[in-house]
Image (cartoon, rainbow, N blue to C red):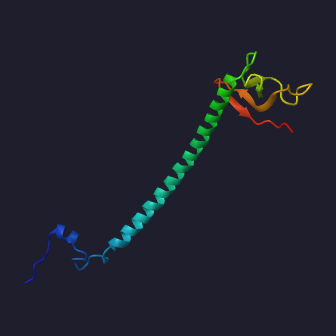
Amino acid sequence: MRIEDKDPDRHNAIEYPMEVGAPKFAPVPIKEEKDKAINIARQHANQEYDRIMEQAAVLMRQAKALQERLDATEMVHAAKFTFNPVYGKKYYLYQDQAISGYRLVQNSPREWSCGIPDGWSFCQAVRKMGDSTWEIVEEDLQ
């Protein structure tokens, strides 16, 4: 006499078909599936890591540019000048040995009719920004 196994929970736990008409299936190779899953997870994590590192590089460039603006702002505010700077206009910083400091003037090194004053040396061109910081302007003085 044959007893039929009707317990569905037991059927789900067995690795082979329990009935004559059941579809054929093979056991899932768990180790291979885990390896595939971890490789896919690593690939996605690496892509996300690369994306984050690109964003970090952009932020670092922005932070460096901001620090350069703050440094230029400090130099300008430490300089002597006798005019009210206009936003967006280019000015020129010179080191003046007579005062052991900087001077902010409106003349570029090429615009002096009698040459740069004695004891002055050109440092950099700067521009006042809308937020009252100063940025260094690349100046072609050749």
Residue displayed at 76% across by 15% down: 83
- Residue 16: give x, y in percent of width and height: 25, 77
In this view, the residue in front, 57 or 7, is: 57
Residue at the left extreme, as displayed: 1
Residue displayed at 69% across by 31% down: 135
Q: Is residue 14 above or below residue 136?
A: below
- Residue 90: give x, y in percent of width and height: 77, 27
In this view, the residue in front, 68 or 31, is: 68
The answer to which quarter of the image holds residue 67 is top right
Q: Is residue 4 above or below residue 90?
A: below
The answer to which quarter of the image holds residue 79 is top right
Residue at the right extreme, as displayed: 114
Q: Which image quarter holds the C terminus?
A: top right
The answer to which quarter of the image holds residue 110 is top right
Is 6 situated left or right of 134 in this image?
left
- Residue 117: give x, y in percent of width and height: 85, 25
Q: Which image quarter holds the N terminus?
A: bottom left
Residue displayed at 26% across by 76% down: 22
Is 6 situated left or right of 56 in this image?
left
Residue displayed at 59% across by 44% down: 58
Is 55 situated left or right of 14 in this image?
right
Is 5 situated left or right of 32 in this image?
left
In this view, the residue in front, 96 or 136, is: 96
- Residue 140: give x, y in percent of width and height: 82, 38
